[in-house]
Image (cartoon, rainbow, N blue to C red):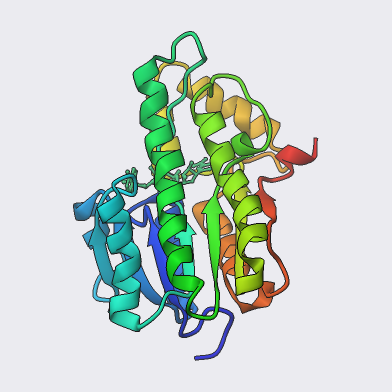
Amino acid sequence: MTGPLAGLSCVVTGAASGIGRATAERFAAEGASLVLTDIDDEGLAKVLPGRDVVRVAGDVAEPADAAAMVDGAVGTYGRLDVLVANAGIIPMADVVATSVADWDAVLRVDGRGMFLTCKYAVEHMKDSGGGSIVCVSSISGVAGQRGQAAYGPAKFVASGLAKHLAVEWAAHGIRVNAVAPGTIRTERVRRLAGEPGGSGYLAAMERMHPLGRLGEPAEVAAAIAFLAGRDASFVTGVVLPVDGGYLAQ
Ligand SMILES: NC(=O)c1ccc[n+]([C@@H]2O[C@H](COP(=O)([O-])OP(=O)(O)OC[C@H]3O[C@@H](n4cnc5c(N)ncnc54)[C@H](O)[C@@H]3O)[C@@H](O)[C@H]2O)c1
C-alpha cells in the first residue's frame, strides 16, 4: 500500500472513543502501523477488532504510562513516525463553579498528559531522522468561550505545544501541528445532552457553527491524517481549525 501514512509507525492516544477512535480507523485504512492507547482498556479492546495493532492501556498523565505508549511503537515497529496526542477530558464550568481540584484535574490530563506524550515522542524522533506530531486542541484552545474556565485554558496547551515544539525541533525533521475542532459529535458531546443545560448548549453550538451543524469525528480524523502524513511535509507549527467556520467569524 502506498499513501501518506502507509507503513508509518503511529501512536494514537485516547483511541478508545470519539476523535481518537475515528483517527485509528482512518489511519488503519491508510495502511499505518498502529499503537492504540487509552486509559479505558475495555473500550480500547473494541477498536479495530481483529486488526493487527498494538494496544497499550495507561494514563497519559503518568510518566511511565506515557513512555510505555511511545515505547510500544519503538519496540514493535522499530521506530516512531507519528504521534497523535488526542487524549483529553472535557469538563464544562465557569470560573466560579470551577474548584482548584477541577482545575488540577483537567490540566493534569489535557496539559501534563499532552506534554508528556509529546516529550517522549520527541526524545525518540530526534535521533531517528524526524517524525510528525499532531496535538488535538480545540476552538477553545484558540479563542475564548463561556463556561470553559479550566478546559479552555487547558486546550491552549495543545496549541502552544504545536507552535513551540515545531520551532524547537524543525531542524531535526520533526513537524508539530494541531487541529482545533469545533463541536464534534463524539461520545463526550452526546453525553452533554443529559447534563444540566447541555441540550440547550448543543442547539446553540449548532447555530454558532456557520455550516449549521456539529462536526463528525471522521471529519477531524481526515484533517489529522493530512497533517500527520507525507502530504503535509512542509507544514509545521499550524493550528488548523476543523470547525465548520466557527473561528472565521
Ligand atoms: N468532541 C468535541 O467537540 C471536541 C472539540 C474540540 C476538541 N476536542 C478534543 O478532542 C480530544 C478527544 O475528545 P473526544 O470528544 O473524542 O472525547 P472522548 O471522551 O470521546 O474520547 C477521549 C478519550 O480519551 C481517553 N482518556 C481520557 N483521559 C485519559 C488519560 N488520562 N489517559 C489516557 N486516555 C484518556 C478517554 O478514555 C477517551 O477514550 C480531546 O483532547 C478534546 O479536548 C473535542
Q: Is residue 7 left or right of residue 146?
A: left
Horizontal side, residue 34 vs residue 238: left or right: left
Q: Is residue 57 above or below residue 214?
A: below
- Placement of 104 over or under 25, stated as above or below: above
- Where 61 falls versus 34 (above or below)? above
Residue projecting furthest to the top? 96
- Res. 103 visible in picture: yes
Residue 165 lies left or right of residue 102; in this view the side is: right
Q: Nearer the viewer, residue 52 or 185?
A: 52
Q: Of residues 168 and 130, which is closer to you in this image?
A: 168
Asked whether, in this view, residue 38 is left or right of residue 3, the answer is left
When asked about the image quadrant of residue 195, the answer is top left
Which of the two residues, 172 or 196, is positioned nearer the viewer here?
A: 172
The C terminus sits in image quarter: top right
The answer to which image quadrant residue 232 occupies is bottom right
Give me the residue at 45% from left, 57% from top.
119
Which quadrant of the figure shows ligand 1? top left
Farthest-out residue, right: 249
Q: Residue furthest left?
A: 42
Res. 183 visible in picture: no
Q: Residue at x 29, y 74 (%)?
A: 53
Residue 239 pos. (x, y %): 67, 51
Residue 75 coordinates in the image, percent (x, y):
28, 77
Image x and y of residue 74, in percent = 34, 76
Percent across and percent down for residue 23 are 46, 62
- The tally of labels here is 0
In percent of the image, x 47 and y 80: which residue is there? 8
| Residue 225: quadrant of the picture | bottom right
Residue visible at 38% across and 40% down in the picture:
109
Nearest to the observer: residue 231 or residue 45: 231
